[in-house]
Image (cartoon, helix red, strand yellow):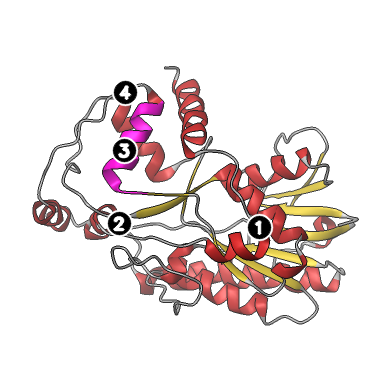
């Protein structure tokens, strides 16, 4: 790549990790943000407002040779499919397609789209991880909008498009469910997960950023879709490892899954319970074999960095 790389969502967990990794590798970086905010030295900031079909990307794309599109309207668990789908499509499908078309017009060569492993479905059979050969089966508005965006980008001629599908991403600056879990653990509260036997794939933000750089530069990546994961653990193992990183003990009660599901149903949150109890395992074999991806940061070290950042922000 001779020109700069435009990174959208550069203030988020994934976009921020990609931005830092590309800077460290010597790539000029342009950060597209909703509004101006401080960025690392050497980053050109381009405010673009909200993500949608009418977003004007021309200033951000000036002098850019490649795009990493990490910005998205993120998943909200309690949103019904029908009520939310139009809103998700506007940001994640139409907004992505608008960026890709303007990138095409600006002469951008490579377009890396950060999608989601949820495109494959909400759960995998235990011991049978998803691969890229399995048919997509998105089940919620977020995943549907991402799957439709994948298809739209791949159909555009003249762009060297690559799709990455990460599962849950962990690392410094994580929010949502993992942040909530850390708050529970530092308070010493018990969790009813001791009897859970499942398999959930994750990926560290640093290792994901390494995969993004390969997607930007490897000639074999063009037109391909890759699942990306560096760690698979059961829900109890995940809790124990995060607790260890925080210097806490995990209090896991061996509650039967049936009772947990009943509790989720009574509280009106069965989707949350199924994500904790069920399996969502993916294989990164294609990424490793085709692009030579070799994640270099062990999960324990990324978890330690995540815990350190969390403690610092919480004043612990």
Q: Residue 250, position in %: x, y?
A: 25, 30
Counting from the top left corner in percent of width and height, residue 223 is at: 68, 75
Name the residue carrying label 4: 248
Mark closer to the chain start, 1 or 3: 3
Local crowd size for mark 4, using a 10 Å CA cut-off: few (<14), some (14–19), many (≥20): some
Local crowd at mark 2 within 10 Å, few (<14), some, or many (≥20)? some
| Label 1: which secondary element | loop
Disc 1 packing (10 Å; few <14; some 14–19; many ≥20): few
Residue located 72% across and 34% down the image: 38
Residue 9 visible at all: no
Q: CA distance from mark 2 to mark 1?
A: 31 Å
Q: Which residue is mark 1?
A: 292
Question: Could you tell which of marks 2 and 3 lies nearer the N-terminus?
Answer: 3
Q: Which corner quadrant holds the N terminus? A: bottom right
Which of the two labelled residues, at mark 3 and mark 4, occupies the earlier sequence position?
Answer: 3
The residue shown at (86%, 68%) is 106
Residue, x 34% and y 30% (percent of image)? 243
Q: CA distance from mark 2 to mark 3?
A: 14 Å
Helix, strand or loop: magenta stretch: helix
The residue that disc 2 covers is 275
Query: Would residue 21 appear left or right of 12 to someone viewing this image?
Result: right
Q: Nearer the viewer, mark 1 or mark 4?
A: 1
Q: Is residue 213 left or right of residue 234?
A: right
Task: Specify whether residue 153 is painted magenta.
Answer: no
Q: Which residues are magenta?
A: 233-245
SS category of the residue bearing label 4? loop
Disc 2, SS: helix
Eye-nearest disc, 1 or 3? 1
CA distance for labels 3 and 4:
10 Å
Q: CA distance from mark 1 to mark 4?
A: 36 Å
Q: Position of residue 47 (x, y in %)?
A: 74, 49
Q: Please tell me in which quadrant of the rendered image residue 214 appears.
A: bottom right
């Amino acid at each position: 790549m001779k020109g700069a790389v435009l990174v959208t969502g550069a203030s988020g967990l994934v976009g921020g990790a990609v931005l830092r990794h590309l800077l460290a590798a010597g790539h000029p970086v342009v950060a597209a943000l909703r509004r101006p905010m401080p960025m690392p030295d050497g980053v050109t900031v381009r405010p673009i407002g909200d993500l949608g079909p009418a977003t004007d990307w021309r200033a951000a794309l000036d002098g850019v040779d490649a795009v990493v599109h990490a910005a998205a309207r993120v998943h909200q668990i309690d949103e019904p499919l029908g009520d939310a789908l139009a809103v998700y499509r506007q940001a994640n499908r139409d907004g992505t397609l608008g960026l890709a078309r303007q990138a095409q017009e600006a002469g951008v060569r490579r377009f890396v789209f950060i999608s989601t492993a949820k495109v494959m479905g909400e759960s995998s059979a235990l011991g049978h991880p998803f691969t890229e050969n399995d048919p997509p089966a998105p089940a919620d508005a977020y995943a549907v909008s991402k799957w439709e965006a994948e298809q739209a980008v791949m159909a555009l001629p003249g762009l060297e498009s690559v799709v990455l599908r990460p599962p849950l991403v962990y690392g410094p600056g994580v929010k949502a469910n993992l942040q909530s879990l850390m708050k529970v653990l530092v308070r010493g509260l018990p969790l009813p997960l001791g009897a859970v036997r499942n398999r959930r794939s994750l990926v560290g933000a640093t290792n994901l950023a390494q995969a993004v750089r390969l997607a930007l530069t490897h000639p074999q990546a063009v037109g391909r879709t890759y699942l990306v994961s560096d760690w698979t653990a059961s829900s109890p193992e995940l809790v124990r490892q995060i607790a260890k990183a925080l210097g806490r003990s995990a209090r896991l009660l061996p509650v039967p899954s049936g009772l947990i599901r009943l509790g989720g149903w009574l509280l009106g949150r069965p989707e949350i319970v199924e994500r904790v109890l069920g399996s969502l395992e993916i294989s990164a074999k294609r990424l490793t074999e085709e692009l030579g991806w070799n994640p270099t940061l062990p999960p324990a070290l990324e978890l330690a960095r995540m815990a350190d950042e969390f403690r610092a922000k919480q004043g612990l």
